[in-house]
Amino acid sequence: MIPELKKNTEQKMQKSLDALRNDLGKVRTGRAHTGLLDHVQVDYYGSPVPITQVANVTLVDSRTIGVQPWEKGMVAKVEKAIREADLGLNPATQGDLIRVPMPMLTEERRKELIKVVRHEGENAKVAVRNLRRDANNTLKDALKKKEVSEDDERRAQDEIQKLTDRFVADVDKMLAEKEKDLMAV
């Protein structure tokens, strides 16, 4: 019962970390990367689909993303979807290629983005701590029902605390990397 609880808790904590990594990927730095458009949905014959299913997304250079729709009729729809995705991007069409230049970040905007990043990190830490609390409550219930001994319960709580510390440290490391990325000019 205890190994299964630890395994489940670790998997859930890993999912929280993956969700944070995903959220941090959406926060744009001064450099272009194709992952920025992964969440853009394009209206493809009445149904929303990810941009990668209707166009080829590439890097033209370090500050420009190139989007080339596979169908000529989709150029305007793809451009509109990028513009309306609330990413602060302004695509420009050149024939059947859509160029998406990355605007330079001002110092003020960088600081705002760092606040957003720190907030996301704090939410991830809270999620990890909530998982620790849930696991500890499960252990206490098992102790009350005499399913585990006090020693086993205490040992398992210590191991879950070590897991929590490890994942919180990983969150801090991810935040530090993202802040360094944001402050790089």
Image (cartoon, grey):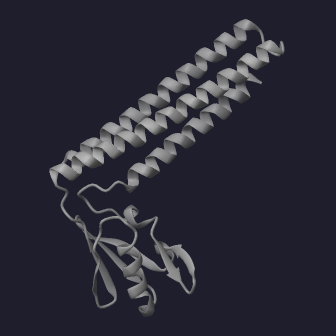
* Location of residue 155 (image quadrant): top right
What residue do we see at 38% from left, 80% from top? 80
Establish if 107 lies above or below 94.
above
Residue 102 location in percent, x, y? 24, 66
Residue 153 location in percent, x, y? 70, 13
Is 180 positioned to the left or the right of 8 in the image?
A: left
What residue do we see at 27% from left, 55% from top? 29
Establish if 180 lies above or below 65.
above
Establish if 117 lies above or below 172.
below
Is 126 positioned to the left or the right of 138 in the image?
A: left
Total numbered badges shown on the rendered structure: 0
Residue 97 location in percent, x, y? 32, 84
* Location of residue 159 (image quadrant): top right
Instruction: Classify the position of the N terminus by image quarter.
Output: top right
* Location of residue 49 (image quadrant): bottom right
Residue 75 location in percent, x, y? 39, 87
What residue do we see at 48% from left, 24% from top? 165
